[in-house]
Amino acid sequence: METYVYWFVLALILLGLELATGTFYILVMSCALGAAGLVALLGGGAEWQYVTAAAVGVAGTVLLRRSKITARSREIQEQGLDVGQSVQVLQWRDDGTARVHYRGADWDAKPESASLGREGPFYIREVRGNTLIISHNKGE
């Protein structure tokens, strides 16, 4: 069997694994193996096949990392849209956290400081994961 067939079979196996797990890094490696198979199909030597697989893998990983960093900064900017919005406290818990109603859903919330009073209007100061940090000040 030709060398390129092995590259393509490995690429397809990784592609199937990526479809099962949803991990984009595996997709990058599948593309890298496919690129190496293409070099083999075009008659490139083994060293060029390995160099191509490595170069495509590294480049894809770098691009994927950058896109995740960009997505994270976008997420931080979107969180800024929530800051200053009012929330309705539904219930205070014994541990000092609260359950609040915001955007049609119930959220967990923590007070910005332990001395925060439990009466009056509350506003979002920060979003940490799926927990809202609330205060009496809008903080815009």
Image (cartoon, helix red, strand yellow):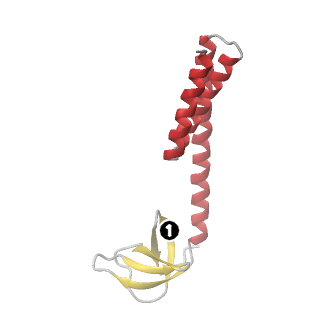
Seen as rendered, the residue at the extreme left is 94
Seen as rendered, the residue at the extreme right is 42
Q: Is residue 70 above or below residue 100?
A: above
Q: Nearer the viewer, residue 37 or 83?
A: 37
**Rendering coords of residue 88 (x, y %):** 48, 85
Q: Nearer the viewer, residue 90 or 140?
A: 90
Q: Is residue 95 above or below residue 40?
A: below
Q: Is residue 105 left or right of residue 63?
A: left
Quadrant location of the N terminus?
Answer: top right
**Badge 1 is on which residue?**
126
> What residue sits 56% from the left and 53% below the top?
72
Quadrant location of the C terminus?
Answer: bottom right
**Rendering coords of residue 18 (x, y %):** 53, 41
Seen as rendered, the residue at the extreme bottom is 120
Q: Is residue 91 left or right of residue 105?
A: left
Q: Give residue 8's quadrant in the image.
A: top right
Q: Secondary structure at mark 1?
A: strand
> What residue sits 62% from the left and 19% below the top?
4
Q: Is residue 92 above or below residue 63?
A: below
Q: Is residue 134 left or right of residue 71?
A: left
> What residue sits 64% from the left and 10% below the top?
45
Total label count?
A: 1
Say what amino acid the circle numbered 1 marks. Glu
> What residue sits 32% from the left and 77% below the top?
96
Q: Is residue 48 above or below residue 130?
A: above
